[in-house]
Amino acid sequence: MKFLRFLGTAAAVFLVCGCASEAPASRTFFAMDTVMTVTAYGGEDSLPLCEKRITELENLLSAQKPDSDAARLNISDGTEMSLSDDTAALLGEVLDFCRETDGIYDPTVYPLVREWGFIDGDYKVPDSAKIAELLEKTGFEKIALSGNTASVPADFELDFGACAKGYAADELKKILAENGVTSALLDLGGNILTVGGKSDGSPWKIGVADPFSPSESVGTLLLSDCAAVTSGGYERYFIAENGERCCHIIDPRTGCPTDSGIASVTVVGQSGTRCDMLSTALFIMGTEKAADFWRGAGDFDMLIITEDGKMLITEGLTDNFTPAEKYAEAEVIRK
């Protein structure tokens, strides 16, 4: 079976616009399968510490690294194992979020992500029997966590890919604060986190990439001291033999690539970890359920681009977002 293969970079999600009046210190490196850049005004000595911290977290959380906590959990055959403080803290937050979303977000779909080819690039459409078989080996509620001890059932596998960068951003923010940095921009492969505003006191200006033309922007966000994360079906996908577009975000209810009618969703909030998880969950939910979830949660805002080219934006962002001309008629989601 032949497929057209596409691999977009997560770093294309946001376009950082403008600059502050003084020269910042900046460090760019490759980690967690993407290019990351930390830009800070003052506290240049903290930048090597940020890169070191990212490496530490990648070595703990990446399911592709054989000595990581995630990889060891995945081959633990149901036995309890001790986790690092970071892994235990993140896993606890993940399980809480899984419950909050009724399993729409579920880190145990990793075997399905791999089966569809999104780990090694060997893309394929599994048959329904294989999907059903793998779905039997999923379910966040079967993960046990007590303190720093966890267990995963035999033949289950989990992956922190949809939250690790968000957690890393939150951790880097702590390092910068400890080193007296009050103005910084973290771009972790498209996961944005701002520390304060720019050095002149103005907010950071962030362009949100157009899912139909990622080098262009659907508009610009003004951000200060918050996180912004986008998930989209345009980032990683392949075209199946029947012409169907298959994106890398797997719906845990079906075991198949998400087909929710959303092209991209951008989440803005205080926690990088939560925004990272929310962007995945809301993308799977679709517009109506995403809007209902936003109304109930009350701790984030979002911007949605639908597959038919419409923009929806929650009312909390309207004063901080300027849409591009073709999205000038955006629909505002209200409480």
Image (tube, rainbow, N blue to C red):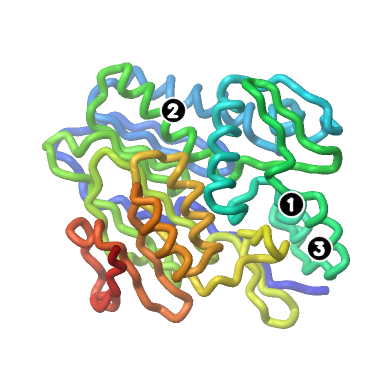
Mark 3 secondary-structure assignment? helix
Can you identify the residue that label 3 sits on? 131
Mark 2 secondary-structure assignment? helix
Q: Which numbered disc, 3 or 1, marks the residue closer to the eye? A: 3
Measured Cα–Cα span from mark 3 to mark 2: 36 Å
Q: Residues within 10 Å of mark 2 (few under 14, many from 20)?
A: some
Q: Nearer the viewer, residue 306 or 124?
A: 306
Disc 1 marks a residue whose amino acid type is Asp
Percent across and percent down for residue 285 are 53, 64
How many dots with numbers? 3
Q: Nearer the viewer, residue 314 or 189?
A: 314
Measured Cα–Cα span from mark 1 to mark 2: 29 Å
Q: Nearer the viewer, residue 262 or 99?
A: 99
At a point 83% along the width and 32% down the height, the residue shown is: 78
Percent across and percent down for residue 8 are 55, 59
Disc 3 marks a residue whose amino acid type is Ile
Q: Which mark is residue 120?
A: 1
Can you identify the residue that label 2 sits on? 171
Sequence order check, earlier mark of 1 and 2: 1
Percent across and percent down for residue 120 are 74, 52
Q: Which numbered disc, 1 or 2, marks the residue closer to the eye? A: 2
Q: Answer yes or no: do the residues labelled 3 and 2 have beta carbons within 8 Å?
A: no
Q: Is residue 152 above or below residue 106?
A: above
Describe residue 171's horizontal placement relative to residue 6 as left or right: left
Sequence order check, earlier mark of 3 and 2: 3
Disc 2 marks a residue whose amino acid type is Glu
Percent across and percent down for residue 77 are 86, 33
Mark 1 secondary-structure assignment? loop
